Amino acid sequence: MIYDYLVIRFGEITLKGKNKMNFVQKLENDVKDKLSRFSMLGIKRHFDDIEIQLNGEDADQVLSVLTRIFGIQNISSAIKVENNLDAMQDGVLRVMKAENGVRTFKIAARRKDKRFPIHGSELNQGLGAYVLKNCEGVSVDVHNPDITLRVEVGYHETRIYGHEYDGAGGLPVGTSGKVLLMLSGGIDSPVAGYLLAKRGATVEAIHFQSPPYTSDRAKQKVIDLTKKIQSFGGTVRLHLVPFTKAQLAIRDAVPEDYRITIMRRLMFRIAEKLAEKTGALALATGESLGQVASQTMESMNTINQVTDLPVLRPLITMDKLDIARIAKQIDTYEISIRPYEDCCTIFLPKAPRTKPDRLHAERFEKSFDVEALTDEAVNGIETLTVTSEDLEDAFSDLL
Ligand code: ATP
Ligand code: MG
């Protein structure tokens, strides 16, 4: 490995105008935090990028961390040389030779320091000719090269970039406000949490459990899913709601085909009360339009009635297969398919109503004490905080 540096480029952050520096500051903190176990690294923030001097640390391991941090568009490996033509020629040649299997190339030189006497286009030609002369079997392709060798003449030194890696995209976690994610043990809701974190949201999770009908293994499953969501950034708190009493009351008071609707209305009421306490500005679910009876337009309309908060549904237009693909990519799939019971499944009616309406729902809710059950559940919430040690665990599986 000839590269001494990794250079992180920002994505959408660069569109943030006056706020840009807040976003960049947040990203820098995330990068430092996530890379803290690599003690030799030198991390320096510039206006357009964050530069990481490897100082002997393993580039691949550092990359595997960086590619999971939201707000990073791409990462390039790089070397630095002095601001003179000889050093640049030697540099591009070294990079070219280090990139095995490359047949075609293009030089893209740029002067940040306009005092440097050779213009970009002249540099392109000069450095390109030098590579052609000293590297056998390669040719220039300006349209679709195997590699673009970027040469950036700075005020003090010149960077030459080699391979470019895709970053995770999105915005730094914590720059978009807090959302309370309704996290089940299923495949969908963890994916929704990941997508929200990717857009910069601070995600807190709420999970409804119904012991003894649901077991400790079901709880562990949700804790493990929370860890995975946390591995993408932020601190994730998990709120566990005792839901047995409410579910039994619903079973006793509500006709079978409306039980899921009423249960979900209760979940939303409880989540809204918790959101008020924790400062979350929206609720979120893993619902996808039409996937099951409780996710039809009519169901969502009837369920939404009980809350004034925005309910974010990042998966609403996605097919199950697409959701599963992301779940595999973010490593939650295997946890989600562990066969433990969820509170939704225990009193599941054989034929839930696919088009419930608000009037019926309101009427059925008159036959039991919705408010008391809501308050009791909120008061019984147990909150776990997933720590950075847990984060290390979640990471070690991935490295
Ligand atoms: P998932 O795969 O996320 O469980 P699903 O396709 O199984 O979704 P439902 O069981 O109808 O769908 O749940 C819809 C949404 O309701 C879930 O995505 C989740 O946001 C929320 N939800 C369901 N069960 C629970 C629970 N026990 N605790 C918290 N939220 C839940
Ligand atoms: Mg489910």
Image (tube, rainbow, N blue to C red):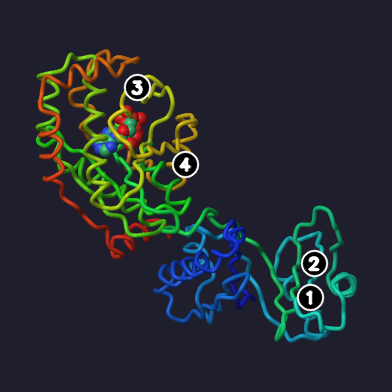
Residue at the spot of label 4: 326
Q: CA distance from mark 4 to mark 3?
A: 26 Å
The mark lying in front, picked from 1 and 2, is 1
Q: CA distance from mark 4 to mark 1?
A: 40 Å
The mark lying in front, picked from 3 and 1, is 3
Dot label at residue 229: none
Q: Residues within 10 Å of mark 3 (few under 14, many from 20)?
A: many
User: What's the residue type where badge 2 is placed?
Assistant: Ala
The residue depicted at 17 percent of the width and 22 percent of the height is: 365
In the displayed structure image, the side of residue 140 where residue 200 appears, left or right:
left
Residue at the spot of label 3: 299
Residue at the spot of label 2: 108
Q: CA distance from mark 2 to mark 4?
A: 35 Å
The residue depicted at 19 percent of the width and 45 percent of the height is: 240
Dot label at residue 111: 1
Whether pointer 2 and pointer 3 mark residues with C-beta atoms closer than 8 Å, the reply is no
Task: Indicate the quadrant containing the N terminus: top left, top right, bottom left or bottom right.
Answer: bottom right
The residue depicted at 23 percent of the width and 34 percent of the height is: 267
Q: Identify the element where label 4 is drawn.
A: helix
User: What's the residue type where badge 3 is placed?
Assistant: Ser
Q: Identify the element where label 1 is drawn.
A: strand
Rendering coords of residue 349 (x, y %) = 22, 17
| Whether the residue under disc 1 has CB within 8 Å of ligand 1 | no
Task: Indicate the quadrant containing the C terminus: top left, top right, bottom left or bottom right.
Answer: bottom left
Q: Nearer the viewer, residue 97 or 35?
A: 35
Q: Residues within 10 Å of mark 1 (few under 14, many from 20)?
A: some
Q: Is residue 244 above or below residue 171?
A: above
Q: Nearer the viewer, residue 377 or 69?
A: 377
